[in-house]
Amino acid sequence: MKFFDQVHLVVAQIPAGRVATYGQIARLLGQPHAARTVGWALRGVPEGCAVPWHRVVNASGRISIRDRQGISVQQQLLESEGVVFSSDGRIDLNAFGWDGLTEDEMRALIADS
DNA sequence: ATAATGACTGGGG
DNA sequence: ACCCCAGCCATTA
C-alpha cells in the first residue's frame, strides 16, 4: 500500500467537528517528517470522495491552501461541522484538535488492503 | 536513476 | 507573536 493511501485511510478516521494537522498525520504513519507529503496526498483527492480532506490544517491552526477559492471552501465545510475560526482565521487546536489513534488502532487500520 | 515539487515544521532572530 | 530559512520526503503535475 502506498503512503498516499495510508494518509487517506487515517484522515478518514477524523470525526466531524475535529481537525488534525499534516504533521500529526505523518507522525501517526511513522514518518514524522513527511508532513509536506501528506498535504500532497490530500491535494489530489477527488470532489465526491469520502475522504474528509478539509479536516486537516497546518500546525498553527490555519488553512494551508494557496488560492482564496479553496480556502473559503475548506473553511465553509469546517464551519458547517461546528468548527470555529477566530477573526484572524485561526482554529483553536486545543478545542477542536483530534486526539489521534492509539498504536493498536493504527495497526488494525493498516492491516487490511 | 535524477531532479523538481509542494495544502509542512521547528527553531532562530 | 511574526517572519524567514533550512531540512524533509513520497511522488511524478
Image (spheres, coloured by chain):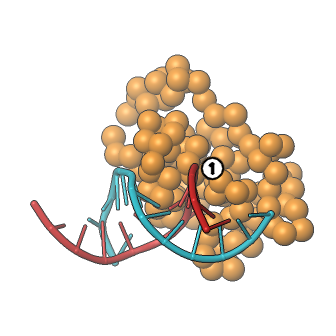
Chain colours: A orange, B red, C cyan
Of A15 and C4, which appears nearest the observer?
C4
Question: Which residue: 89% across, 68% down?
Answer: A87
Of A88 and B13, which appears nearest the observer?
B13
A30 w.r.t. A75: above or below: above
Query: Local crowd at mark 1 within 10 Å, few (<14), some, or many (≥20)?
Result: many
Question: Seen in the image, is A89 located left or right of residue A14?
Answer: right
Of A89 and B11, which appears nearest the observer?
B11
Residue A50 visible (yes or no): no
**Chain letter behind tag 1:** A
The x and y percentages for residue A34 are: 44, 50
A18 w.r.t. A62: above or below: above
Question: Which residue: 79% across, 61% down?
Answer: A90
The x and y percentages for residue A55 are: 67, 52
Secondary structure under the numbered disc 1 in the rendered image: strand
A58 w.r.t. C13: above or below: above
Residue A111 visible (yes or no): yes
Question: Which residue: 38% across, 46% down?
Answer: A3
Q: Which residue is mark 1?
A: A21
The x and y percentages for residue A67 are: 63, 79
Classify residue A71 by image quadrant.
Answer: bottom right
| Amino acid, disc 1 | Thr
